[in-house]
Image (cartoon, helix red, strand yellow):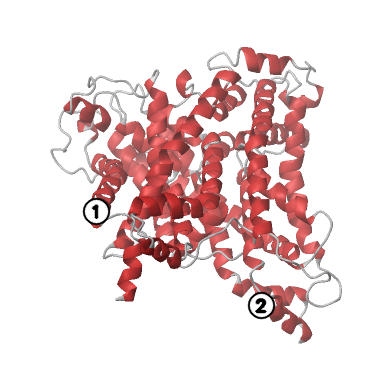
Amino acid sequence: MSIQPVPETAQEAPALLQPVRGKGPVGGRRPLWLMWPSVALLVLIIGVPFLIAFYISFLDLDQYTLRSWIHAPWVGLSNYVTALTAGNVVGASTLTSLGISVAFSLLTTLLITPIGILAALTVNTEYRGRTIVRALYLVPYVLPTFVTALVWRMMFLNKTGLVDRFLAGIHVANINTYWLLGPNSFWAMVITDVWASWAFIYIMVLAGLQSIPAELYEAADVDGANAWQKLTRIVLPQLRHILGLALLLSTLNHFNNFTLPFVMFGTPPPVQADVLPLNIYVSSFQLFSFGLGGAMSVITLIIMLIPGFLYIRTLRLGETAA
Amino acid sequence: MTKSKHRNSQELLSPPVRIVATIVLAVFALIPIIYTLLLSVTPDSEVGGDNLLPSHWAFDNYVQMWTTVNLAGGLLNSLIISGIASMIAVILAVGAGYVITRFKFHGRQPYLYSLIGLQTVPGVMLLLPLFVLFASLQALLHVRLVGTYQAVIITYLTFALPFATWLMVSYLGSIPVDLEEAALVDGATRLQALWHVIVPLALPGVVVGLVFSFLTGWNDVLFASVLTSPETRTIAVQLQAFSAAQEGGSLPLYGQLMGAATVSALPVVILYMIFQRYLIGGLTAGGVKG
C-alpha cells in the first residue's frame, strides 16, 4: 500500500503485508540485524515496563517504598478491590471513571460522524475556493490538544467566557453557568472534543469518497436516483470499511485522551470529567499510590483488548481483500 | 460537457445546501480561534470585562509573555526532545521496515500486529512503570534520570517508534525490489542500496514519519509533565503550568496566556500546512491523533 495525498487516491484498509520473496531480492545473507536495534529498544521500553506494570499492581507501592520497589509489600488483589470499589481519595472509582470514559468516547464519536461526513460532502466536488475551505476545516484538528484545551477553557469561563455570553444573549441559560465545575464539565469536555476532532472523520470519509468510481454515480443517475438515495445506497455502503476503521480509531483515541481534561480542568478534575487516564494519573503521580495506579492501568488494558482486537481484525480483513 | 456531467452526478449536496453547510462548519471551526486571537491582544485587565472588544489592542502581550513565562526555554526544549526522538524513531524504523518488507522470518507477522496493538495501549500505562524504573535506577546508580532530556526522549520513543515502523512498512512495501536488485548486482552492499536507492524513494514516508513523530512529541503533556524538571520543561507543560497558575491569582494574565498558546500552536499549524499533501495520506493510514 502506498500512502498518497487524499485528492488522488483513497486508502483501503491498510494492507500491511505484501507478498514477499522467500530469500529477498538477491541471494546472500539477509541483513536481519537492521531490525535488532528497534526490537531491542521496544522490548526495553515497552515490554519490560509492561511486565513491571502488572507486578506493581500487586504491591503496596508509594513514594516511600518506591526506591526499592522490588521489596515493597505484596498485597495481592487489594489494589484491584480498592480500584473497583473506592478509587483514590479525591476522584471517582475506576468503575465510575470507566463509565465516564466509555460515555465520552462513544458520544463524541457518534457526534463527529455526521459532521465529518457532511464536511466531506461539501468539498467532494470541485468549486472555486475549495482548497481554502479544505485547509480551514483542518485548523481545529491540527491544533495541539493542550492549546485546544486552553482555548476552550477560556470559552467556557464562567460569566465572561464566550459560551456563557452567547447563551445568556439568546436567553437560553443564565450568564452565571459553570462549565468547568460540576455536571456541566462533562458536556464542556464533549463539546470541546467534538470541535477538535470532527476533521478526523472528515479526512477519512473524504479519502473514501475519492475512491468511489464515477460509473456508480452515473448508473444511479440512469436509474433516476436522487441525492439522498445515492448517499444511502451507494456512498455509505462503499464507505463502510473506511468508516468502520475511522469509528474504531476515533473511539480508541478519545478513550485514551488525557491531555484535554487534564489541561482544561486541572487536577483534581470535577468527578463528572474524571476520565480513566486522568484518574490513573492523579492516583499515581499526585497521590503516589503507584500500586493502585498500576491496578487501574491493568483494568484499562483488559478493557482495551476488546477494541484493540477488533482493530487488528479489521486490518487483517483488509489484508485478505487487497 | 461530459466532464461537468461527471461532477454533477457526484454532487450529493445542491449548491445552496453546500454553501450553507460550509459556512456553518467554517464558523464553528473559526470562532474559538478568532476569540483566542482577540483575547491575545486584549489587555489582561479587560479580559473579564463587559465588552468583548478591548479598548485598545494590547500587542504588548506578545512581548511581555516571554518574560512572564519561560516560553523560549519551553520551545527550545520541545524542539530538542521531539526532534531527537523523531530522528531516532525514523532511523530505526527504516531499518526495521526494510527487513520486514523484504524478508520472511519467524515472528514477522506477530511483530507487525503487536506494533498496531500498541496504539490501543493508554500512555499512562507505560508512564507509570517507566517512572518507577527510572526512579529505582536513579537510586541504584546514583545518576539523575527523571528530569533529563534522555528520560523524556526514551519515553517518546514508546509511541514514535511503533508508529514510524508501521509507516515505513507501508511505504517501503510499495517500492519495487527491482531497483535495489540492480544496485546489488552492480556490487553495492545492502546498506549502500538501502541508503542510496530505497531511502531517496521513500523520502515522502521518511518526512511523514519525522513530522508526525515530532508533532506527537510536541503535543505531549502526559509524559513531559511527570518526567521534566523546570529546566527541561517542554512548551506544553510550560503552558499548562502557566494556565494553572492563573487560578486564584489577583489578576489572571489571560491575554498573555492566549498569546503564548498562539505562539506554541503556530509551528504545528505551519508544519501541517507545508506538508498537508503528505500528512493527510499518513493520517488516513495511521490515524495517530484523536
Horizontal side of B159 relative to B59 (left or right) equals: right
The residue wearing badge 1 is: B19
Horizontal side of B72 relative to A85 (left or right) equals: left
The residue wearing badge 2 is: B196
Horizontal side of B257 relative to B271 (left or right) equals: left
Residue B27: horizontal and vertical position, in percent? Answer: 26, 45
Residue at the image position 65 percent from the left and 72 percent from the top: B175
Height in image: A23 above or below A270?
below
Q: Earlier in the sequence, mark 2 or mark 1?
A: 1
Dot 2 lies on which element?
helix
Q: Spatial distance from mark 2 to mark 1, Cα to Cα? A: 49 Å
In terms of depth relative to the viewer, which is nearer, A132 or B216?
A: A132
Label 1 sits on what residue type?
A: Ile
Quadrant (top left, top right, bottom left, bottom right) of the N terminus of chain B: bottom left
Which chain letter matches label 2? Answer: B
Label 2 sits on what residue type?
A: His
Q: Which mark is residue A295?
A: none
Horizontal side of A159 relative to A73 (left or right) equals: left
Height in image: A209 above or below B143?
below
In terms of depth relative to the viewer, which is nearer, B68 or A1?
A: A1
- Does residue A6 appear anywhere in the picture? no
**Quarter of the figure with residue B256:** top left
Residue B151: horizontal and vertical position, in percent? Answer: 64, 43
In terms of depth relative to the viewer, which is nearer, A251 or B125?
A: A251
C-beta proximity under 8 Å, tags 2 and 1: no
Toward the left, the furthest residue is: B55
Residue A314: horizontal and vertical position, in percent? Answer: 63, 48
Dot 1 lies on which element?
helix
Residue A231: horizontal and vertical position, in percent? Answer: 40, 52
Residue at the image position 21 percent from the left and 37 percent from the top: B43
